[in-house]
Amino acid sequence: MKGLTALLCGILFGIGLAVSGMTDTAKVLGFLDLFGSWVPDLVFVMGGAVCVTLVAFRFIMKRDRSLLGELMSLPSNTAIDGRLLAGAAIFGIGWGVYGYCPGPAISALGYLETNTAIFVVAMLVGMALANRVGRA
Amino acid sequence: MFAYTTPLIGGLLIGLSAVALLLFLGRIAGISGIVWGAVSGQPDNAWRWLFVVGLLAGPLLYHTVAAVPHPTASALPWWQAVLGGLLVGFGTKLGSGCTSGHGVCGIGRLSPRSLVATITFMATGIGTVYIIRHILGGV
């Protein structure tokens, strides 16, 4: 049941990314081109998604357990530190270099383009490197 | 169709997915965290892999059923995919989240930490595209 729910949530998320245009790097880069030929469409992706989570999370976060009886696994770290800022800054640079953040990159793998596969492999290598830095 | 309709519908679906994952599994739909958890072999991992499979299958389902063509392939060179991927992976792991975990879910939780992260990666993303397109003259 848990696995099936996760699969369905993944499918829904993936459809959302494709419908919204997030799997199109040209659109994403156009959206990030705020001081050039800015394409504002994608504001509505984050806007629409946050509207839903802002309302629904308020109620769900009061629960002790999920509907399937799992413990609620919410992030406990509230620190706004150098690690957070450096990580977010580096992530944003990478996003601007190619036009994918992690979700759309995975979602676009099915389009069978070599560069997307290269991006995802490099992303996993990047994660592994950061994991090593984190332990040091 | 109005240019903002499909981004809005897509955004709402992404929000619904994040809500369902939290409601049923008690988990935050942070893609970078789920992907790292899957490949690094965390305990109780099947749900992560299934979510990733769904993430990959969803667009194929949409493009097939709705008969919408795939987006045009990126014209950027392979080395830019390598560089972008490395930075995205390194940054999201170091900063514990990406557009979904910090953006969609973190702001939904009213987390100041996630709001700061979101503003930061939006700013450096915009800055990077500015530098590449308008200073270096790239695409």
Image (spheres, rainbow, N blue to C red):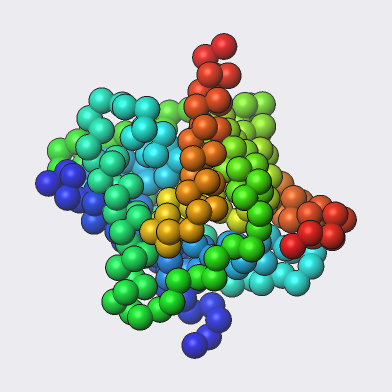
Q: Is residue A32 left or right of residue A76?
A: right
**Which residue corresponds to the image point at 62% horizontal and 26% vertical from the top-left?**
A83
Q: Nearer the viewer, residue B76 or B32?
A: B76
State the residue lying farthest toward the bottom.
B1
- Coordinates of residue B70 in the picture (x, y in percent): 45, 71
| Location of residue B2 with respect to A72 vertically, above or below | below
Q: Is residue B43 left or right of residue B105?
A: left
Q: Quadrant of residue A79?
A: top right
| Location of residue B96 with respect to B22 vertically, above or below | above
State the residue lying farthest toward the right.
B135
Q: Is residue A32 left or right of residue B50?
A: right
- Coordinates of residue B112 in the picture (x, y in percent): 56, 40
**Which residue corresponds to the image point at 49% horizontal and 88% vertical from the top-left?**
B1
Query: Is residue A76 in sight in this rendering?
Result: yes
Q: Nearer the viewer, residue A127 or B97?
A: A127
**Which residue corresponds to the image point at 17% horizontal and 50% vertical from the top-left?**
A4
| Location of residue B49 with respect to B14 vertically, above or below | above
State the residue lying farthest toward the left.
A1
- Coordinates of residue A8 in the picture (x, y in percent): 24, 56
Query: Is residue B120 in sight in this rendering?
Result: no
In this figure, what is the number of numbered marks?
A: 0
State the residue lying farthest toward the top.
A136
**Which residue corresponds to the image point at 33% horizontal and 71% vertical from the top-left?**
B62
Viewport quadrant of the C terminus of chain B: bottom right
- Coordinates of residue B66 in the picture (x, y in percent): 33, 79
